[in-house]
Structure formats: C-alpha cells, structure tokens
Amino acid sequence: MEKGKNIVAGFDIGGAHLKVARAENGRVVAAATLATPLWQGLGSLVSAFNETASLHEDAHLAAFTMTGELADIFRSRQEGVAGLLVEIGRHCPSAAKLIYAGRSGFVNIEEAGRVWADVASANWHATASLVARHQGDALFVDMGSTTTDIIPIGAGTLLNEGYTDAERLLERELVYTGFTRTFLFGIATEAPVRGRLSPLMNEYFASMADVHRILGVLDESDDKHSAADGKEKTVAASTERIARMVGRDAGDLAFGEWLNIAAWFSERQLRALHDATFLVTSKLVKGAPIVGAGTGRWQVRRLADRMDRAFIDFAEVIPADDAVRAEAGAAAPAAAVALLAG
C-alpha cells in the first residue's frame, strides 16, 4: 500500500459480471467490469479476481456486495451467499474485509453468514445510499445488463417499499430488463413488420445488445458476453439475429426496416420502465431529478426525458477522476461500497 494513501477496493459480485472499483482517499481512481457467468461455475469469478489484482492487491480495505447468490449453481440464496463468502475469504488476503448487508450496514464475513438475507442482492441499496448522500431528493435508476433498479429518495433517505428481490419485483422497484443481456421475447411478444404485427419466435435468437448495436447506441465494451448464436458482434450479424425472431433472413427487409424494428424493441423496454417509474414516483417531491447509473444510462436518460425530469449521471455525482467516470458509472455498486466503506 502506498504510503499516505487510504486505498479501498469495492466489489460487486453479480451472476454475470464482477465489478471492481478502486478508491484512493475517498475518490474513485479506477474501475473495471469483467464477465463472470456464474451459472457455468465459479472459475470465471476466480479468474476475474486475478485479472483485476492491480486494482485491489494493495488495498487496506476491501468492501463487497453481491447479487450472484441467485445463480442457479446454488440450491438457494442462502447457499449462494455462503458460497460467495467462501470465495471472498480466499481473495484480497492483505486487506480487511467488509460485506455490505444493506439495512444492517457493513459486517464482517462471519456476521454476513448470519444476516445472509440482508446481504443477498443488496447492491442496489449501497448505490442508492451513496446517491442519497449527495443528492437529497432524486429518483435513482440503475440499468445494468440484466436488471433495472428504481429507488425513490427523499431528503437524503431511501423511500423504497421493498427490500428483497421478491418484494422489490412486486413494488416495481426492480424491473427485470437490462440494456444488453435481456432476451427479446422478454420485451415483447410481437414486432411490427411491414405494417403488421408479427408474433415472435420464443427462442433465444437475439438480445437487447443486438437492438442497441443496430441503433448505434451500444458501447461495445459494455457487451461482455457471447451473442446468442456465438457469432460476431457487428450490425450485420445483429440484424441476422433479430431477423430470426420474426422468422426471416436479414435480406428479406431493407436495413431501414430492421432499424425500425430495433427501435420498436427499445421503445417497448422504455415503456416498461416508464410504467414502473410512474408507480414509484408518487413519493417524490416535484422536480426531483433522475440519477442514472449502469451500462443502460442512455435508456435512463430517455426515461428522464419521458418523465419530464432532469437527468444527472451517477458518475458526475460521486467523487471520481474524470478519466474513469464512465467506468465508475457502469460499475456503480462497486464504486458505492468502496466510497461508503472508506
């Protein structure tokens, strides 16, 4: 550890990604996101810890949050929390370790096993709590690759109704739609093709990454998993994948028509977020802005426009070096626990 520096590493262990942030003296100076498909086993997580060693190997404190306990390699969420705690114990050997337990605050590894229900999928609580420190009244919306969190904040206090995933789904504070990994048949059951609504094929032929690639709004560095067919990630290949959803080949329609179909899927996703947001915003003061985080900030900005609210990027709210703000915004929960713990 560098003399005179307070170095804290933050980790968000998800089912699809490991997000890591490095804070020095209360400021995020580096962040990274790596693919970790836990449904295939824990080997990818071990590799990701090793690949990001430069961000955390000299930290005096390592803070962790998680959602990966939901991965179906575990029989239950409790088993998942326990399994990830074992992995946490094996890494960052020189650092003290804290686990974020949401409403129970930061706890050590042993205590985390006892309050596993508070530890499970608490990353949204960490990020929203950090936003509440810096922005007293806001709607916090974090759209990642797979899910979207929608959390009202008033006078610096979280106003959420739910806490667990099950509760938050019912309250529409958790919407299972994301910017890249969501299957298209999870967005709509039909799509417009030459003036008619064509039913979709309920197959994993394409994802929202294909949609947003065709629309030209996808940062390719945010799409870290293989395409549905395992082939290249180009506009042409994405068009072929979307064509299969309506039983066609890419050459059956002009590119402008496929562009319209991609816009349809993105709009349907936005409508789902819009509907959920209407249910959640009843507690907000008039004029409260939307603070957006995650890889889907482009979509969250559209949501703010639709709701006639100002948009503030999470990366601009937190103390961070300008060069890493984009990465910190994409790895928001990791940045949050690093800053909260420090």
Image: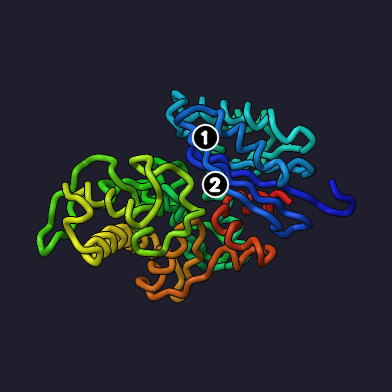
Please state, as top left, top right, bottom left or bottom right, where the N terminus lies in the image. Answer: top right
User: Quadrant of the rendered structure where residue 276 is?
Assistant: bottom left
What residue sits 46% from the left and 50% below the top? 223
Residue 185, compared with residue 192, is above or below; it is above
Q: Which residue is mark 1?
A: 117
Q: Residues within 10 Å of mark 1 (few under 14, many from 20)?
A: some
**Viewed as shown, does residue 38 lie left or right of 101?**
left
Q: Position of residue 336 (x, y in %)?
A: 62, 53
Distance from Cα at disc 2 to Cα at disc 1? 13 Å
Residue at (42, 53) in percent of width and height? 148
Horizontal and vertical percent position of residue 311: 48, 71
Badge nearest the viewer, 2 or 1:
2
Vertical placement of 181 versus 263: above or below? above
Q: Residues within 10 Å of mark 2 (few under 14, many from 20)?
A: many
Q: Determine the image quadrant of residue 99.
A: top right
Looking at the rendered structure, the secondary structure element under dot 2 is: helix
Picture disc at residue 9: none
Helix, strand or loop status at disc 1: helix
Q: Nearer the viewer, residue 298 or 289?
A: 298
Residue 19 horizontal side relative to residue 198, left or right: right
Q: Give residue 316's quadrant in the image.
A: bottom right
Residue corresponding to mark 2: 123
N-term-proximal mark, 2 vs 1: 1
- x and y, in percent, of residue 47 in the image: 61, 34
Name which residue type carries label 2.
Asn
- On the question of residue 275 being in view, the answer is no
Q: Is residue 324 above or below residue 162?
A: below
Residue 71 in sight here? yes
User: Which residue type carries mark 1?
Assistant: Ala
Q: Position of residue 147 (x, y in %)?
A: 42, 49
Seen at 35% across and 64% down, the residue is 215
- The residue sitting at 25% across, 63% down in the picture is 255
